[in-house]
Amino acid sequence: MALNLSTFQADLKTALLKAQVKNQKDNVPMEDAMKNLADELAVEIDKYIKTATVSTTVSTTVTGTCATPAGAGTIAGSGSGSGTGSLS
């Protein structure tokens, strides 16, 4: 699937709001507040990146020599392929 920026932006906003709620409690130390924010953002960034689709195309040519009962010979070949996958 292609990356969806508008969904990611909405998810980041939600993450920021979640962190804000956690951090509005009385006497939340700054270090805890920063961890809460980092945790919420990390979840959304990880989720966004893993929605990417990776596509590849490969072409190759192979040449070489071989020994046969009749003497040396040449080997030639080619190939191509493609694939898609997702990040994990």
Image: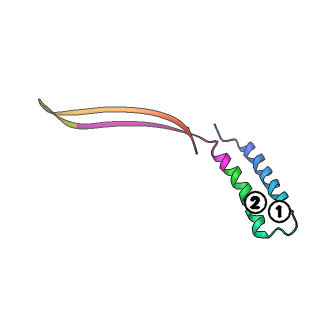
Colour mode of the rendering: rainbow
Q: Is residue 17 above or below residue 67?
A: below
Q: Residue at x 64, y 42 (%)?
A: 51
Mark identifier at residue 37? 2
Q: Residues within 10 Å of mark 2 (few under 14, many from 20)?
A: some
- What's under tag 2, amino acid-wise? Leu
- Badge 1 element: helix
Residue 9 shown left or right of residue 64 in the figure: right
Q: Residues within 10 Å of mark 1 (few under 14, many from 20)?
A: some
Q: Position of residue 70 (x, y in %)?
A: 11, 29
* Callout count: 2
- Residue pointed to by mark 1: 23
Q: Position of residue 53 (x, y in %)?
A: 59, 39
Q: Position of residue 11 (x, y in %)?
A: 76, 47
Which sits earlier in the primary sequence, circle 2 or circle 1?
Answer: 1
Residue 1 lies within the magenta run: no
Residue 71 shown left or right of residue 19 in the figure: left
Q: State whether the magenta stretch is mostly helix, strand or loop.
A: strand
Q: Residue at x 66, y 50 (%)?
A: 46
- Badge 2 element: helix
- How far apart are labels 2 and 1 at the CA level? 8 Å
Residue 55, by quadrant, is top right
Do residues under tags 2 and 1 come within 8 Å of each other at their CB atoms? yes
Q: Quadrant of the C terminus?
A: top right
Residue 86 shown left or right of residue 6 in the figure: left
| Magenta stretch, residue numbers | 46-64
Q: Quadrant of the N terminus?
A: top right
Residue extending farthest to the top is 70
